[in-house]
Image (cartoon, helix red, strand yellow):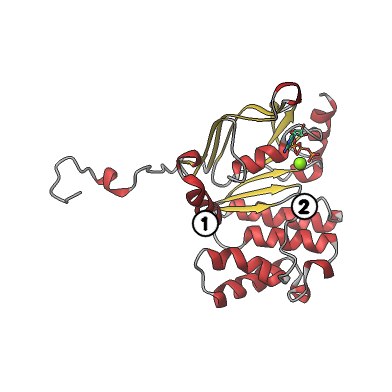
Amino acid sequence: MSSHDPSASPSSQRSATPLSVDAPVLELRSLTRTHGTGIAEVHALRGINLSVHTGELVAVMGPSGSGKSTLLTLAGGLDTATGGQVIIEGQDISALGRKGVAALRRRSVGYVFQDYNLIPALTAAENIALPRELDGVSVRKARKEARAALEEMNLLQIADRFPDEMSGGQQQRVAIARALVGDRRLVLADEPTGALDSETGETVLALLRNRCDQGAAGVMVTHEPRYAAWADRVVFLRDGSIVDQTLATGADSLLAAEGAK
Ligand SMILES: Nc1ncnc2c1ncn2[C@@H]1O[C@H](COP(=O)(O)OP(=O)(O)OP(=O)(O)O)[C@@H](O)[C@H]1O
Ligand SMILES: [Mg+2]
């Protein structure tokens, strides 16, 4: 487009999908995911609507099998929806293609898997540095960031250990450090405290909270009201639907809300 084109407004030159300040970092619209067909059909998600803005941490709670991990994998572009839309930083990811989604994921999404997903042949520091290197950061800078992230988790002493030389809690914290390095705008964490004692769990939640306060948007699955109390909002899932949303005003009110279901 030439600069003399009279139809070229400043905003149309900037970006195909300009992102307003108030636009959510993550938006799920009528999201559905169905597995199998016929008698084996499972409706893992049945029309989820959810927006998460910069600065927000949203906790997702609900019984086993209610669709929490499914929601997170779809939100992170790791699985494809049966229906509806996933919009990350203003982009409908279904329009991006596989390579485009992979690039967006590396650049914008930090993901903590329920089962950690560390690469067995890489050390703690290498696991954390790898996604950054894949995204074009120099090896030197990525390694430096990795060590800083490990230090934040009080794990510098295991930087050169391989996953099978770490405890479950250490592996989980390395997985969290991997999701928090860089300036990813969206952090998705699936039960990030499952293997941690309560003190370490609180430390991890404080880091996650801090990351959101500094400009990320976060979604965290948890079974623990005391961790959900760190969130701005709690979304309750049941059988693939959001059945309630509450402000996280403290662990006691969350326990009461859960008990009432
Ligand atoms: N690949 C799959 N094939 C068939 N069904 C699946 C598949 N993945 C998930 N499901 C089903 O979808 C539903 C939601 O599963 P999901 O893993 O999202 O639950 P969850 O809330 O994360 O549970 P948990 O608390 O145990 O981690 C469950 O009924 C599950 O059995
Ligand atoms: Mg799960």
What is the quadrant of the C terminus in the image? top right
Q: Determine if residue 232 is in view.
A: no
In the depicted structure, whether residue 159 falls above or below residue 135: below
Q: Can you give x and y, in whole percent of width and height, for residue 152 in the image?
A: 70, 67
Give the residue at x 22% y 43%. Answer: 9
At label 2, the amino acid type is Asp
Please give the residue where the numbered disc 2 appears in the rendered image. 115
Question: For this view, does 2 lie left or right of residue 165?
Answer: left
Q: Say which quarter of the image contains residue 176.
A: bottom right
At label 1, the amino acid type is Arg
Q: Can you give x and y, in whole percent of width and height, for residue 225 in the image?
A: 80, 40
Q: Can you give x and y, in whole percent of width and height, for residue 146 in the image?
A: 64, 70
Give the residue at x 71% y 55%. Answer: 206
In the depicted structure, whether residue 5 falls above or below residue 151: above
Dot 1 beta carbon under 8 Å from ligand 2: no
Q: Which of marks 2 and 1 is nearer the N terminus?
A: 1
Q: Can you give x and y, in whole percent of width and height, for residue 179 in the image?
A: 64, 57
Please give the residue where the numbered disc 1 appears in the rendered image. 107
Mark 2 nearby-residue class (10 Å; few <14, some 14–19, many ≥20): some
Question: For this view, does 105 lie left or right of residue 219?
Answer: left
Give the residue at x 50% y 42%. Answer: 93
Specify the label residue 52 is tagged with.
none
Question: Quadrant holding ligand 2?
Answer: top right
Mark 1 nearby-residue class (10 Å; few <14, some 14–19, many ≥20): some
Circle 2 SS class: loop
Q: Are marks 2 and 1 in contact (CB under 8 Å)?
A: no
Question: For this view, does 71 lie left or right of residue 26?
Answer: right
Q: Say which quarter of the image contains residue 154.
A: bottom right
Circle 1 SS class: helix
